[in-house]
Image: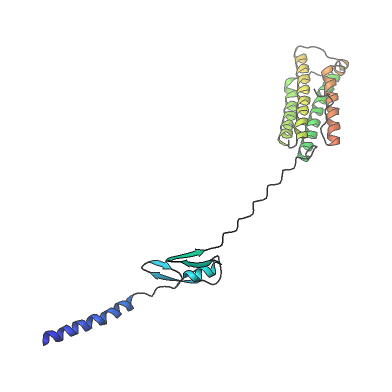
Amino acid sequence: MRLKSSGRWLLLGTFLTVPLVSLSQPPQAKQTLIVNGQPEALPLVQIEGRSYVDVEALARRANGSLSFNGNQTLLTLPACPTSAPAPAPADTPPPAPGFSKGFLRAGIEAMSVVREWRSAVINAIQRGLPVTDDWVANLRANAAQNLRLATVAVNTDDDRSAMQLLTNEFNFMKQLSDQLVAAGKSMTYISPDDLKNDPLNQKIVTCGRALGAMAANGQFSDDGSCQ
């Protein structure tokens, strides 16, 4: 009789233990499914680590349809709308003709410095003073620096075309200056009239005038004076 009584208490203890263990487990959070960002969510059921949803509710929420064929369940969802093709990029408009403001400003400054360079050596010849390389070096370096600034400012096709003529003008002046320096070193006398009639000196004058006319018109035109 004692053995049977002990068995009943053991069995009773086992039944009492089960709910206590169940109560000790943390409650699971409620899971939901949101379809296409709609505010009303569908409840999810967690079974053995997997999530399940009511397929009929899913079909309704996704604007689909549900049909049955024997042991098959057919879920049909609407096709995703195809996105409209991206508009073709607009063609880049060609640059406006004429000189850019930055190049026009830098080009005028470069022409002015070359003109000052020429005026300085001509005044020296008219006064009978020798044109030495040390004296000319600062004038040449200043003109070269302004020519580089004009090169950096090139932006339009007209700028690039005029830049070549502006470079020609600088090279013409450098050539004339080098000739005068060489004449000074060899003690060769150059009269003001000889310099005035010198073809290279005349080319510098006519090229400078052509560049000045282009600057005034704001666009490139080549009459051959700087070639």
Residue 131 shows in this picture: no
The foreground one among 194 and 53 is 53
- Is residue 144 rendered to the left or right of residue 46? right
Quadrant in which the N terminus is drawn: bottom left
Quarter of the rendering containing residue 167: top right
Q: How is the image coloured?
A: rainbow
Say if 115 sits above or below 82 in the image: above
Quadrant in which the C terminus is drawn: top right
Quarter of the rendering containing residue 104: top right
- Is residue 69 rendered to the left or right of residue 210? left
**Which residue in the rendered view is the most extreme toward the right?**
193
Please name the residue shown 77% across and 25% down the image.
168
Say if 90 sits above or below 203 in the image: below
Residue 209 lies, in percent from the top left, at 86, 28
Tell how many labels.
0
Residue 97 lies, in percent from the top left, at 80, 38
- Is residue 217 rendered to the left or right of residue 100? right
Residue 194 lies, in percent from the top left, at 86, 15
**Which residue in the rendered view is the most extreme toward the bottom?**
1
Please name the residue shown 77% across and 20% down the image.
177
Say if 25 sits above or below 138 in the image: below
Residue 101 shows in this picture: yes
- Is residue 59 rendered to the left or right of residue 139? left
Residue 185 lies, in percent from the top left, at 75, 14
The foreground one among 187 and 217 is 217
Quarter of the rendering containing residue 37: bottom right
The foreground one among 41 and 172 is 41
